[in-house]
Image: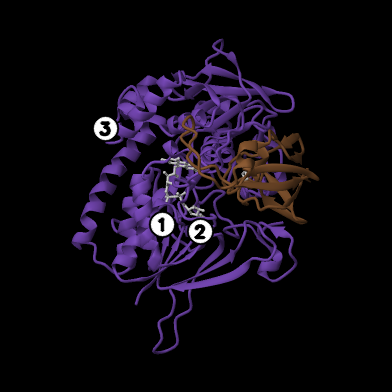
Chain colours: A purple, B brown
Amino acid sequence: MTRVAILGAGPAGLAAAEAALAAGAQVTVLDEGARPGGQFWRHRPGLTDPRMQHGVRRFEQLQSALAGAEVHSGAAVWSVEPGEPGEPGEVGGAVVLRAAVGPADGARREAVVVEADALVIATGAHDLALPIPGWTLPGVTTAGAAQALAKRDGVSVGRRTLVAGAGPFLLPVAQSLALVGSTVVGVHEASRIGALAGGWLPKPWQLLGKAGELAQYAGALARHRIPYRVGSGVVRVLGDERVEGAVVAQLDADWRPRPGTERVIECDAVALGHGFVPRLEAAIMLGCEVAGDRRGRFVVVDDGQRTTRPQVFAAGEVTGIGGADAALAEGAIAGYRAAGVAQDDQRLHAALRVRDRMRRFARRLETAHGIRPGWTAWLDDDTIVCRCEAVAKRAIVERAEVPLRAMRLATRAGLGPCQARTCGRAVEAIVSEARASAAGVAAAGETVDGSSSSAQGGDVGFDRRPLLAPVRLGELGGSDRPTNGEN
Amino acid sequence: MSAARNARGSIRSTGATGLTAVPAAVEILVEGETVTGRAGQTIAGVLLGSGRVAWRGAQHGERGVFCGIGVCHDCLVTVNDVEGVRACQREAVDGDRVEREVRE
Ligand SMILES: Cc1cc2nc3c(=O)[nH]c(=O)nc-3n(C[C@H](O)[C@H](O)[C@H](O)COP(=O)(O)OP(=O)(O)OC[C@H]3O[C@@H](n4cnc5c(N)ncnc54)[C@H](O)[C@@H]3O)c2cc1C
Ligand code: FES
């Protein structure tokens, strides 16, 4: 029987598990979350408001399918490697995963090792919040944090929240905040009508396909009297010990603030979501090809969700930002293929159709809401870019000419506990802008230290990490101090 | 919060919020002070629910939750003498002793 391991139990991983089980595979699912569901399903009956959760019935189906699998929740997978060939007459594992299983960051978690013949990487994405002067003040969170805290914990960070960034995700965040009792003082979408119209229609919720869900959010905005502004963004967060207000300004088509349009809005929380960053480190550790440009790098997959490494598949936001429906479709395809089902098998048909439609959706999403290079104009020289190590923009610009690795060591940007997950994309953008202006050319679409081309262990910017998840040295066989693999 | 404590695990319709069951309470000690949250909440959820927004010292002021999903490490606390626990990832358990950390 084919042993399929699935890393990540969000929509993509769960759909992969369901498909692989249906195809007769022996399935093991690992996720560091306390329970399956990923970033999408986190409702807690009795604890949080059910109106925030979509697709509950589908989740219940997926959960009951999981009964046939070995599921490790609270499993921080810190390593994935190609397996050893088996003894003669024995099947060797294509991959080996190592996890610490137990309460998050606990001192004495159980070591779990999983060997499998095929792996589905479904590690999802995290928010991309661009640095803004004042963004380290308590009360500033990512939009995803506001969403997670509302859906999972039933709380909001503030009483008056300003939501800002880009993309349709800001709408459910505003709705959730209203449902947990925060006033939402405004939703500020950086993209302008022109870009939105190019990507789809003047208002994101008029988008075909997603229309139902998005129209519902539009209704919620109206009901809660939440102002929605396009071509607008937060350019400074104000406050002494915590957020007391924010400066919003009109942004031009490149997201450069328009002088003279600044206005102060009183609030005690700011939720920022300028996009998402895929969690690529597992794919990079295995040597899977990753490609893209400064607008985004993703795991390269073929029509059957196969990566460039044998028996390694990828699905969901790691392969492109397309939302939960895309993740579900890709997961199903990956699960069937990992279990050995042929690409032209009719069980894949429906999922292939949905995936292709959602890929078009993702392209329009990027056209309409993708990050524009002018955002760096709202930074001051002393704005902290790397939150962990408190590295200001100035220090990064001063060393923009040296190779990225040397710049990191000199400034410590991206070397703190988050391992550049939070600041990586912003640092890359600042470096490439500084290099371009030094070279006297406009920043094209290329990434730093490389080009817009793909790379096999080559240009992965800040995304290569020695450990996939934080573990204590004791769990690797040493003392029990926490480590992130460097220092 | 007190309603939750009085009605441990009982079912009640609150209409306004759409919640039907009042979950059991969870009590943790934050810097020695008893803080009550709802069972199932993360430590970050309990801290925010009690009105706290920041609980870790950093170079330029305090930090609390930033990413909410275990990525940024802004929210680190010491739990039952174990350092470096992400408050947004760890579910609160009755009796947990939570202390602030400083990382400069
Ligand atoms: C904070 C946040 C909140 C979001 N909320 C919503 C929402 O409410 N509605 C919506 O439509 N979209 C939401 N999104 C967008 C969301 O990413 C997608 O809609 C969808 O969840 C993507 O599915 P996925 O399966 O690709 O990834 P995810 O759902 O992100 O699942 C990936 C899983 O992999 C696990 N994982 C990653 N690395 C490791 C590791 N090393 N070890 C163990 N486990 C690991 C993670 O714990 C996670 O559970 C949110 C995104 C974020 C970042
Ligand atoms: S808030 Fe980012 S790790 Fe907890």
Task: Answer whether labels 2 and 3 touch (C-beta < 8 Å).
Answer: no
- SS at badge 3: loop
- Mark 2: is the Cβ under 8 angstroms from ligand 1? yes
Mark before the other along the chain sequence, 2 or 3:
2
Tags 1 and 2 in contact by the CB under 8 Å rule? yes
Question: For mark 3, what is the residue?
Answer: A208
Tell me the quadrant of ligand 2: top right
Tell me if the residue at label 1 has its CB under 8 Å from ligand 1: yes
* Callout 3 crowding tier (Cα within 10 Å): few <14, some 14–19, many ≥20: few
* Tags 1 and 3 on a common chain: yes
Mark pair 1, 2: CA separation: 9 Å
Which residue is located at x 75 percent, y 34 percent? Answer: B60
**Residue A437 falls in image quadrant:** top right
Q: Which residue occupies the foreground of this view, B90 or A273?
A: B90
For marks 1 and 3 on the same chain, the one whose residue lies earlier in the sequence = 1
The three-letter amino acid code for the residue at tag 3 is Leu
**Chain designation of label 3:** A
